[in-house]
Amino acid sequence: MLHEAQALVLDFGGVVTRTLFETHDLTEIALDLPGGTLTWRGPFDPASDPLWRSMQADEISERDYWRKRTEDVAKLTGKPWTEMSDFVKAARGADPEAVMRPEAMAAIDQARKAGKKLAILSNELDLFYGSEFRDRLPFLKNFDVIVDATYTKILKPDPRAYALCLEELKLPAGACVFVDDQRRNIAGAEAAGMQTVHFDVLDPATSFADALRLLAPSSS
């Protein structure tokens, strides 16, 4: 059943943050790699990224994808990384706010001012970034709910992931607008009864505008 939207539920990586594909230049500087070293582009150039295509085909998980990328970059840098968070923290830890999407910050602020609840539903928030990264992002204190599979061990699109978020929000599924850049996660949210926006990393502004439009009170 569709309700008037009362909450904005966001994936974190790729939606709130710019993707690692978009920030290769910052990563190369942070890791002291020559410009142009990192060539995998995921959704920005699927044809040149077979590993990404395997993930999209559900042949490997999202975590498998980033585990392999961590191994690749560890070899390039000579770092003894064993966890995905080692790579992400090294690539992004210097200035976390530099990789936040300005469109996300504006949408979060607008939703909060409109009295909507805010939630993060992520497969890898602390797994990828580390809990200290979260502590350096003051805007996250405005979120009512953060459900992170780092701790729940339940990955989207498992129906239980959405159910956990809805339970913590204390809202029916139809009252929540869910935004994610992975189609399979959107399909899972739709099956749960949530309103959805498939986030286009190539056009963040339009995706957030669509989400805010769903959050706006309907005219009688």
Image: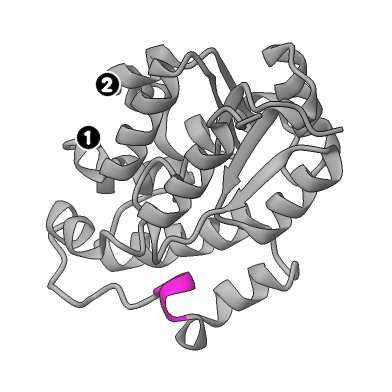
Residue 121 position (above or below residue 118): below
Q: In terms of secondary structure, where does tag 1 sit?
A: helix
In front of the other: 145 or 78: 145
**What residue span does the magenta drawing correspond to?**
41-45
Image quadrant where residue 174 sits: top right
| Cα–Cα gap, marks 2 and 1 | 8 Å
Q: Residues within 10 Å of mark 1 (few under 14, many from 20)?
A: some
In front of the other: 177 or 36: 177
Q: Residue at x 57, y 62 (%)?
A: 65
Q: Amino acid at mark 2?
A: Arg
Q: Amino acid at mark 1?
A: Glu
In front of the other: 218 or 18: 218
- Dominant SS type (magenta): helix
Quadrant location of the C terminus?
A: top right
Q: Residues within 10 Å of mark 2 (few under 14, many from 20)?
A: few
Label ID, residue 136: 2
Q: Residue at x 57, y 27 (%)?
A: 217
* Residue 101 visible, this angle: no
Q: In terms of secondary structure, where does tag 2 sit?
A: loop
Residue farthest along the bottom direction in this orientation: 47
Kindly indicate whether the residue at mark 1 contacts the one at mark 2 (C-beta within 8 angstroms): yes
Label ID, residue 97: 1
What percent of the width, then of the height, locates residue 122? Answer: 58, 36
